[in-house]
Image (cartoon, helix red, strand yellow):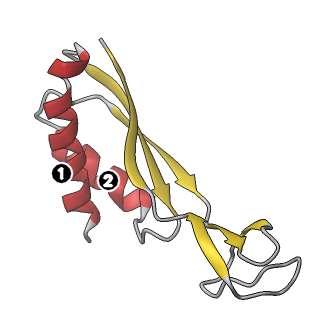
Amino acid sequence: MHELSIAQNIIDAVQTALPEHGLTRVERIGVRIGTLSSVDPEALTFGYQALIAETSLAGSVLAIEMIETRARCRRCREEFVATDFVFVCPKCESSQCDLVSGQELEIVYLEGE
């Protein structure tokens, strides 16, 4: 369950960022997770809630946005949603494709006072 260490890293990063954003209390933390990142959003939320219980982030919400895996064909430039680990362009059937999204794991915003 590497989600617990990811949750701890998010908490550490947010607590470090609070002064530079002029915040003393956080209500919501927005996080983007790519479908290829192998992070279970339910386990991450569970770990986050368990770790913030007695911290300055108690009561805050981890808002997770899942980012689909997208690829772009090198031959015809078609961009498509990849549903498998083998990327094949649905337009020209080329397997020469580049990953566009799906590996994200990032904090994108903080809401608070």
Quadrant of the rendering where the N terminus is positioned:
bottom left
Name the residue located 78 percent from the left edge and 87 percent from the top edge: 94
84 lies left or right of 30: right
Q: Is residue 25 above or below residue 76?
A: above
Q: Are marks 1 and 2 in contact (CB under 8 Å)?
A: no
The one nearer the camera, 90 or 83, is 90
Residue in front for this viewpoint, 108 or 72: 72
Q: Which residue is mark 2?
A: 46
| Among numbered discs 1 and 2, the one appearing first in the sequence | 1
Q: Is residue 61 above or below residue 65?
A: above
- Mark 1 residue type: Gln
Callout 1 crowding tier (Cα within 10 Å): few <14, some 14–19, many ≥20 = some
Q: Secondary structure at mark 2?
A: helix
Q: Which residue is mark 1?
A: 8
Q: Image height check: is 49 above or below 22?
A: below
Inspect the image, locate mark 2, and give the three-letter code of the amino acid beneath it.
Phe
Which residue is painted at 65% across and 82% down in the image?
Answer: 84
- Image quadrant where one finds the C terminus: top left
Residue in the picture at 46% in, 65% down = 103
